[in-house]
Amino acid sequence: MSARYAWHPLARIWQDPVTGDRFMAELTPDGFAADLVNGFEVPAGLAEEMVRHVDAPMKDSILRLYRSALRMGAEWEPELAKVTAPSLVIWGSRDPACPVAFADELGRAIRAERVIKFVDCNHWPLLQRPQQVAIALEEHWAAPGITRRRP
């Protein structure tokens, strides 16, 4: 992450104790699924599956995570240069939460083998283009010098 990154509007809501708690208290599965489909282009069936898991413990986890990460970019950025594992960055070029410019920045910071920007993707390329992401991962793991651990 980058110290220059400014949290997206929803993250800023979740980070605030008053508005974040209110947001989660008023969150409805149908409304959240619609927001995921319309704002983040998550396929409808996957959005419905996702929101089925947004129960009270998940809401609390989301709020705790975002509230613990107020300065994530500034805190993590210096450590990125220490990454030694061969890396692959996968990004959606139309991501409204984290602009695509950060993909190349992250790739440089961790000396990624490749930075893949899916032109037709939003925040979740893994959900929007699972086959292409799987191919990219298999190619990455098959590259010389990369050891893939099998379960």
Image (cartoon, rainbow, N blue to C red):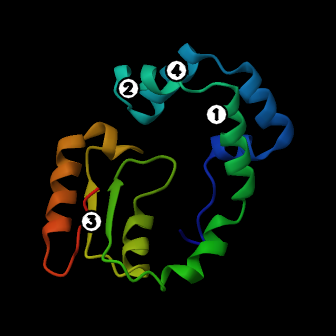
Graded by Cα atoms within 10 Å as few (under 14), some (14 to 19) or many (20 or more), the crowding at tag 1 reads few
CB atoms at circles 4 and 3 under 8 Å apart?
Answer: no
Q: Distance between the residues labelled 1 and 2?
A: 17 Å
Residue 85 is drawn in which quadrant?
A: bottom left
Residue beneath the point at 72% across and 28% down: 24
Mark 4 surroundings: few (<14), some (14-19) or many (≥20) residues within 10 A:
few
Distance (Cα) linking label 4 and label 3: 32 Å
Tag 2 near tag 3, CB within 8 Å: no
Q: Which of marks 4 and 3 is nearer the N terminus?
A: 4
Residue contact between numbered discs 1 and 2, judged by CB atoms under 8 Å: no
Q: In this view, does 12 lie above or below 104?
A: above
Where is 151 relative to 35, above or below? below
| Badge 1 or badge 3: first in the primary sequence | 1
Q: How far apart are marks 1 and 3 (CA)?
A: 30 Å
What secondary structure is found at the residue carrying circle 3? Answer: loop
Q: Is mark 1 on a helix, strand or loop?
A: helix
> Amino acid type of disc 1?
Met
Secondary structure beneath label 4: loop
Nearer the observer: mark 1 or 3; the answer is 3
Q: Mark 3 points at which residue?
A: 149
Q: Earlier in the sequence, mark 2 or mark 3?
A: 2
Residue 52 badge: 4
Q: What residue type is labelled 3?
A: Arg
In three-dimensional space, the C-alpha distance between marks 2 and 4, rounded to whole angstroms, equals: 10 Å
Could you say where residue 144 lies in the image, as x and y percent from the top left? Answer: 13, 79
